[in-house]
Image (cartoon, rainbow, N blue to C red):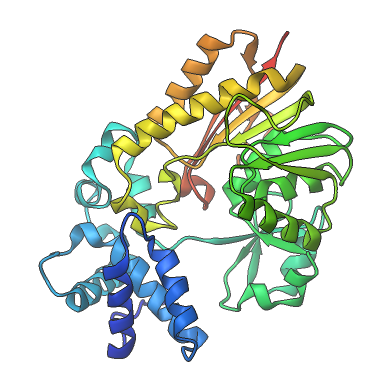
Amino acid sequence: MPDRETKIEPSLRRIAAEVIQKSDRDHPADAILRETFKRLRVLSPAETRRITEAVFTYFRWRGFLNLNDQISAQIEQALESDAQFQKDSASLSDELLRAKTVPKWTMEEVNAGPEWFRILQTAPNLWLRAKRGQGSVLAEKLVPTTPGPLPDAVLYQGEEDLFRTPEFHAGEFELQDISSQAVSLICDPQPGETWWDACAGQGGKLLHLSDLMENKGLIWASDRAEWRLKQLKRRAGRAKAFNYRAALWNGGPKLPTKTKFDGVLVDAPCSGIGTWQRNPHARWTTTREDVKELGAVQKRLLANVAASIKPGGKLIYAVCTLAKSETVEVVESFEKQFPDFQPLAVKNPLNPKNPNAATSPQIWIWPHESGGNGMFVAVWKRTS
């Protein structure tokens, strides 16, 4: 790994400091960065990349900084700490990383080992998902890339703006984290089936489900935000995914359709603790109260979709969090309320190809094992 730069030009440092000072709970750092770059169109791609790195590095190392220092000094200290850690990760003990990498309340919710804290202090991978069966072809077109552990996953290691590539505009790939790709493979939808992506968002997993179904059958997509469904429509057009219908749904007991499904995916709103490597600002704005409140929302979502699943159909619950209030406690609550849903053991597709690999109805995906976001997935089969 090349040595990290420990200095940033004063003009770019001032912009990074401005972004940091504007970032708070209601104004995420990534959104402030987008607004800033839209306003400062004279910045080159290299300059925007350097500012982004400085901002994310600051939040990654915020727990180690003296917050009474000037922001510019804190940025420089964060860059120096990051460069030293990437050069020699053993320079920081497990105990120090555990104490300063995340807020203290996290330990009450996440049962994590030292590997998690160490991976949080590194830059995330950029994963692509090629069209079904085209992973190796895409890897040859976009360089530098490395084929991933899933059939059509590709790890991109370059600095090109992928949204400007002809391959992207031709619908040959989507930017999608490898852990999210694993969720769709766990769903295992078959051509001709009827599925519901209940919290579809902008459609990342829906497009993968459609590809796995060979564009056959039907997928209902719902979300509470109309703008996300509009974005899904644009993405689906580019990906040539046509076997879906979209409808607004606020998560309440009144469902968007009376259709009975072979499978339902509830990729529920969550605290996003599993994304803290990619989104370090969220470490310092998320609270334990958020986690508890979201756990209640997740329980309601599962309860509301349960009746829409056919006997013999599957229910998949997925969240990009590792908090017990949003994972095992949600599962326990659902199983007490709905005894006709039996846990269904499945394999983790990110495990090595081993016919004797263990199966489980609950799958934990940790960043230091997957190279992607942290996720939790639970699977049930409706018996009656």
What is the residue that sits farthest to the left in this orientation? 68
Nearest to the observer: residue 359 or residue 206: 206
Q: Position of residue 48 (x, y in %)?
A: 45, 81
Q: Position of residue 378 (x, y in %)?
A: 57, 27
| The quadrant where residue 114 appears | top left
In the visual, does 228 lie left or right of 135?
left
Please tell me whether residue 251 is drawn above or below residue 7 in the rendered image.
Answer: above
Q: Position of residue 168 (x, y in %)?
A: 73, 69
In the visual, does 383 lie left or right of 46?
right
| Image quarter (top left, top right, bottom left or bottom right) of the C terminus | top right
Please tell me whether residue 331 is drawn above or below residue 167 in the rendered image.
Answer: above
Please tell me whether residue 117 is drawn above or below residue 219 in the rendered image.
Answer: below
In the visual, does 129 lie left or right of 62?
right
| The quadrant where residue 190 appears | top right
Q: Residue at 50% of width from left, 24% of height from top?
A: 299
Q: Position of residue 58 (x, y in %)?
A: 29, 67
Q: Residue at 85% of width from left, 45% of height from top?
A: 243
| Image quarter (top left, top right, bottom left or bottom right) of the N terminus | bottom left
Asked if residue 1 can be seen in this view, the reply is: no
Nearest to the observer: residue 299 or residue 149: 299
Q: Residue at 58% of width from left, 54% of height from top?
A: 177
